[in-house]
Image: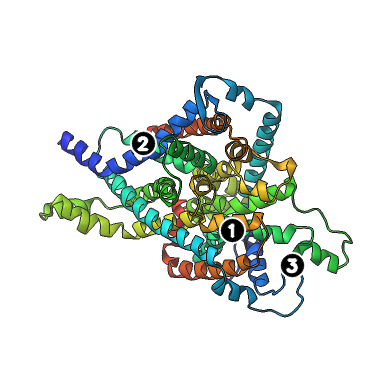
Amino acid sequence: MQTDNQKKGILYAGPMGLWFILFFALPMVIIILYSFLTRGMYGGVEWKFTLDAFRQVFNPNFVEILIRTFLITVGCTALCILLALPCAYAMARSRHQILFLLLIMIPFWTNSLIRIYAWINLLSADGIINQFLISLHIIKTPLKLIYNQNAVIVVLTYMFLPYSILPLFSTMDRFNFSLLEAARDLGATKLQSLTKIMLPSIRGGIVTSIIFTAIPVFGAYTVPLLIGGIDSYMVGNIIVDQVTKTRNWPLASAFSMLLTVPITIAIIIGLGGKKNEKK
Amino acid sequence: MRRNKTPFATFILILVLIFLFLPLIVISVYSFNPGKTVFWTSGPSLTWYYKLFTDSGPLWRAFGNSLLIAITSSITATIIGTLASIGIKFFTFKGTKTISILSYLPMVLPDVVIGISMLVFFSAIKMKLGLGTIFLAHVTFNLPFVFILINASLEEFNYSIVEAARDLGASQRQTLLRVIIPAIMPAIFGSFFMALTMSLEDFLITFFVSGPGSTTLPLFVYSTIRYGISPVINALSFVIILGLLFIGWIARRHLKDIASGT
């Protein structure tokens, strides 16, 4: 029976396993390999072992960009979660859940480049916000609303807010809100009932929200490229530039490893932890 | 009069919705502006819609590519992912955990990493970049979402109906086709729909693995943003937003399932 199970399981799960080995694991192995090789003259690599790529990663310019990317990620994620908590709470308690879900998902489904394009229309020097303020005589010369770091933070928050709201909503939706009333009846303040009763049971949702928001923000490319200026280059931009412009594949691979390794370790620990909890 | 129990949270929610919709509204309104700037030189017109439907060959070719890739990759990902999920749920075997970890990773790694690893892989095996490589990449990033969504629905699945079916003499195959798959059909549709939207929306991974002549809609929009903005994009966006509203409304009963999958 055990071997029968094994056979059938592999029959069903095999195609996906094979797919991931071929098109995910193998490319990852190649990336790891490339990060230790010498860059080729015209892109590609030469088969000579070197640690050059990793030395270049820690060049002060890149370190500055890494730190900036980290700070932008922390800022955006914090903003997203702070906004998402009351939103998810209001949605979970609302009688119009489906309507609100639809309203959250429509922008999320609209192509991200189209939304970036809309933001350019809104924020640029002769854009809508500036024209509006000038026509009201609030300002005389256009404000610099775009091509700086603040614009990047606003638009990134805009992009990934649904990623924070949806998982939070899913967990809050399962929360029994009468527990809050029970806590209030037993003398807890409103804040106490929220932090001591609700917070512990939605912790999982908060963690999921943080993961789903922080990771894409950290790897952002289009927003800093199209909305940001020279002061808002992020890691994603360096990686793409190494591939498309300077054609330094080992360096691009090394940067990719820098993003991949911590996330992989976190997932292995996270999934391992989950299993232990069940036991 | 019904009192709102959560006035503050609802207030924030409404502000956030305005924030989320502001760019979409702007785009929709400006799609009716005949001029190319933010100024309204004359009244609303359908100039850009006319151009969109009569004089936008490259745009529609890109749209066709996007649709082709989205449909084929979503169907492939849904079939492979659903089978894997059923396999892991109903048969215990060695390697389950490895498969779980392998399937989580592509979902949580930044797009730029997935894109670059696939580009490096395809050029290492000397595969020509084009619609084929885009298809392979899209199945790869869609699979984890399908797998996790179906897993979640099998988690809530009442196992005793499988036993009942077997007791009543159904073969394993019959049980799968007539009992299990119909029971998780909403989740299968949900994950197909999710994969479809993600495939239509992806820019960065496609950017890496596309070749000449395989421009998808996001790539087309990107190039118009970079090299001269055309308000035809506004008209197209409004059409897409209306389409999404329509599809969303049809799928409104399954919105919650889709939301819990993310």
Helix, strand, or loop for circle 2? Answer: helix
Q: Do we see residue A21 in this rendering?
A: yes
Three-letter amino acid code at the position of disc 3:
Thr
In this rendering, the answer to whether B83 lies above or below A102 is above
Residue B213 is left or right of residue A238, and the answer is left
The image quarter in which residue B47 lies: bottom right
Residue B37: which numbered mark, if any? 3
Q: Chain of mark 3?
A: B
Q: For mark 2, what is the residue?
A: A21
Residue drawn 67% across and 42% down? A75
Q: Are there few (<14), some (14-19), or many (20+) residues within 10 Å of tag 2?
A: some
Same chain for marks 3 and 2?
A: no
Point 43% across, 70% down: residue = B250
Q: What type is the residue that disc 1 sits on?
A: Val
Say whether marks 2 and 1 touch (CB < 8 Å): no
Image coordinates of residue A36 in percent, x first then y, are: 52, 23
Q: Chain of mark 1?
A: B
Nearer to us in this view, A57 or A266: A57
CB-based contact (under 8 Å), mark 1 and mark 3: no
Residue B46 place in picture, x, y as percent: 63, 78
Q: CA distance from mark 3 to mark 2?
A: 50 Å
Residue B95 lies, in percent from the top left, at 30, 33
Give x and y (percent) for residue A92: 52, 58
**Is residue A189 visible in the rendered structure shown here?**
no
Residue B52, compared with residue A210, is above or below; it is below
Q: Nearer the viewer, residue B256 or A54?
A: A54
How many residues crowd mark 3 within 10 Å: few (<14), some (14–19), many (20+)? some
Looking at the rendered structure, the secondary structure element under dot 1 is: helix
Q: Quadrant of residue B140?
A: top left
Which residue is identified by label 1? B221
Which of labels 3 and 2 is toward the front? 3
Q: What SS does tag 3 mark?
A: loop
